Amino acid sequence: MTSRRRLQGAAAVLISIALFSGARALGSGAADSTHAPDTTHTKSTLPVGDPAIGKKFFLKLNCALCHKADGTGGVRLTGNPTPNWRDAKRMADPKYNNDYLRDCITNGKSKSGMVAWGKTGQLKPTEIEHVIAYIRTFSAKK
Ligand code: HEC
């Protein structure tokens, strides 16, 4: 592939990303037939994350070391063990809404060994939204 064609390819990708996020921004708030309304997405003004992107960060940052690849958790270092994200009843509890998950990922839970991924700059706010969307897939109805 010539560098010119590669540039064109990159431009096409960027344009489709822009179009995609634009469509998402327009779609938010209105009834969306493909995505169920996200009632757990509360205070954040950021667009709802993409679970496929979230999964990449989850793997890259080794979240599974403590949370397990299947999200079942149960790993205890000090303090609280990692929760079971497959427990749909727990995950539907407003106590564990996206604001709570966002706060944990941003500020950590130092007593339990959960890292402050946001504060340390390892995950940016939009990336945290993607990770939250991925975490939600563990308890989503199949
Ligand atoms: C060293 C172990 C460890 C690693 C690695 C880790 N976590 Fe955690 N995490 C924990 C523990 C322990 C808790 C439970 C904290 C508590 O409730 O006190 C937790 C809690 C959480 C919570 C709150 C979940 C809930 O439902 O209550 C989220 C969200 C979370 N982690 C996301 C992540 C993400 C995303 C990563 C990777 C970027 C990650 N964690 C990596 C140990 C870890």
Image (tube, rainbow, N blue to C red):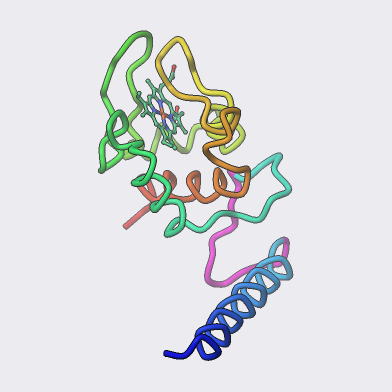
Report the label total. 0
Q: Position of residue 63 (x, y in %)?
A: 35, 36
Looking at this view, is 7 or 140 the one in front?
7
**Which one is nearer the viewer's eye here, 45 or 7?**
7
Left/right of residue 94 with respect to residue 63 in the rendered view: right
Is 9 in front, or is 20? Answer: 9
Where on the picture, by quarter, is residue 90? top left
Majority secondary structure in the magenta region? loop
Left or right placement of residue 59 versus residue 41 in this view: left
**Where on the image, by quarter, is ligand 1?**
top left
Residue 71 part of the magenta-drawn span:
no
Quarter of the rendering occupied by the N terminus? bottom left
Look at the image and give the residue range highlighted in magenta. Answer: 29-40
Residue 24, position as x, y percentages in the image: 65, 68
Answer left or right for 5 relative to 59: right
Q: Residue at x 26, y 36 (%)?
A: 68
Q: Position of residue 30 (x, y in %)?
A: 71, 66
The residue most toward the front is 3
Q: Quadrant of the C terminus?
A: bottom left
Residue nearer the viewer, 123 or 4: 4
For residue 17, above or below residue 58: below
Q: Is residue 125 above or below residue 1?
A: above
**Residue at image x 71%, y 65%?**
25
